[in-house]
Image: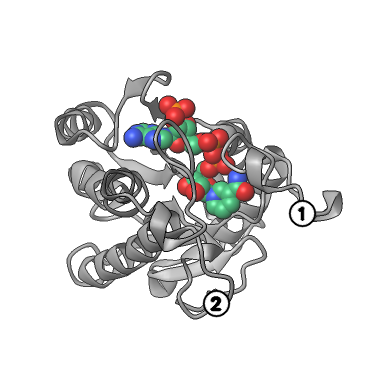
């Protein structure tokens, strides 16, 4: 979907609500960039500690609450972007070798990076429109590509992002039958200067590092081009498909 007959991208005319989950570096930049792209959508943010709504992807009860709020106040929900993710934090460091792998860290990473976005989709499904197009996009990562894994390491993050890709691809196939106007997209933002990448980007040259605002713009440009027919794609910031 590119532009309508009179030159406007369809999002310019979409009515309803948009939700960005995970107002971190990229999430906040998406919230800043969206009003220009979709001026009539009422924008909502949801995070663990900040946002219009509170949600913790690791807590099924809080997801259920978010789902109830979405059905009551955010219908029709035309655009959902999950920008939440976890690479490092308390008790969680990307592993360099097998001996560093910990069950608890695997569990946390999978809760946020793998099944969190799927449970989010389940929670908000009832608010998605049946008769109009909608998007559910989630930020994955190129390191979740199994075909592209040449370096190894980062077991919990890699494994969880690969699992997210499979889970949301499976959802895209289900919605093709049950919600045929919904489009599910997995997006890789490219290395972006946020808290998540801060400890790991010393080898990335300045000109290959996005600011959060740049990442948000390129991701929205890619997402705007997706349609229900392309649902289930795993795409990089430049619109190129990434091997599963
Ligand atoms: N930055 C990069 O270079 C890069 C590259 C590839 C992919 N990505 C992906 O892009 C997405 C956005 O990352 P970012 O760079 O913007 O990182 P970020 O600034 O660290 O933001 C991550 C967001 O996720 C939220 N989050 C973490 N655990 C959560 C939970 N249990 N429930 C709800 N929200 C939770 C964080 O909330 P708190 O502040 O409360 O922790 C934060 O708002 C992530 O999925 C990441 O994997 C980023």
Marks 2/1: CA–CA distance: 18 Å
Q: Residue 56 carries which label?
A: none
Q: Which residue carries the number 1 mark? A: 204
Residue 144 percent coordinates (x, y): 46, 65
Q: Nearer the viewer, residue 112 or 104?
A: 104
* 34 horizontally vs 214: left or right: left
In the image, what residue occupies the spot 39% across and 66% down?
Answer: 162
- Crowding near pointer 1: few (<14 within 10 Å), some, many (20+)? few
Please tell me whether mark 2 sits on a helix, a strand or a loop.
Answer: loop
* 120 horizontally vs 198: left or right: left
* In this view, 243 is above or below 23: below
Residue 228 percent coordinates (x, y): 38, 68
Residue 115 percent coordinates (x, y): 27, 52
Q: Which of marks 2 and 1 is nearer the N terminus?
A: 2
Please tell me whether mark 1 sits on a helix, a strand or a loop.
Answer: loop
User: Which residue reaches farthest front?
Assistant: 99
In the picture, the quarter occupied by the C terminus is bottom left
* In this view, 211 is above or below 173: above
Q: Choose top left, top right, bottom left or bottom right for residue 160.
A: bottom left
* 181 horizontally vs 61: left or right: right
Q: Label 1 CB, ligand 1: below 8 Å?
A: no
In the image, what residue occupies the spot 60% across and 34% down?
Answer: 195
Residue 217 percent coordinates (x, y): 67, 47
In the image, what residue occupies the spot 56% across and 31% down?
Answer: 28
- Crowding near pointer 2: few (<14 within 10 Å), some, many (20+)? few
Asked whether residue 136 appears in the rendered view, the answer is no
Q: Which residue carries the number 2 mark? A: 148
Across the whole image, how many numbered discs are drawn on residues? 2
Rendered image coloring scheme: one colour
In the image, what residue occupies the spot 62% across and 43% down?
Answer: 197
């Amino acid at each position: 979907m590119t532009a309508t007959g009179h030159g406007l991208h369809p999002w310019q005319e979409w009515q309803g609500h948009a939700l960005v989950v995970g107002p971190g570096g990229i999430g906040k930049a998406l919230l800043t960039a969206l009003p220009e792209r979709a001026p009539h959508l009422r924008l909502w943010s949801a995070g663990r500690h900040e946002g219009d709504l509170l949600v913790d992807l690791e807590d099924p009860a809080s997801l259920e609450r978010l789902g109830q709020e979405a059905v009551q106040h955010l219908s029709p929900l035309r655009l959902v972007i999950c920008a939440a993710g976890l690479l490092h934090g308390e008790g969680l460091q990307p592993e360099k070798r097998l001996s560093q792998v910990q069950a608890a860290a695997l569990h946390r990473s999978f809760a946020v990076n793998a099944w969190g976005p799927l449970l989010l989709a389940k929670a908000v499904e009832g608010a998605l429109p049946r008769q109009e197009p909608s998007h559910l996009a989630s930020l994955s990562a190129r390191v979740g590509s199994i075909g592209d894994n040449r370096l190894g390491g980062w077991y919990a993050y890699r494994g969880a992002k690969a699992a997210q890709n499979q889970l949301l691809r499976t959802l895209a196939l289900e919605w093709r039958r049950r919600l045929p106007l919904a489009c599910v997209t997995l997006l890789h933002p490219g290395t972006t200067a946020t808290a998540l990448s801060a400890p790991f980007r010393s080898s990335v040259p300045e000109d290959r590092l996005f600011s959060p605002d740049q990442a948000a713009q390129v991701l929205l440009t890619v997402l705007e081009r997706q349609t229900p027919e392309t649902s289930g794609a795993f795409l990089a910031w430049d619109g190129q498909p990434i091997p599963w």
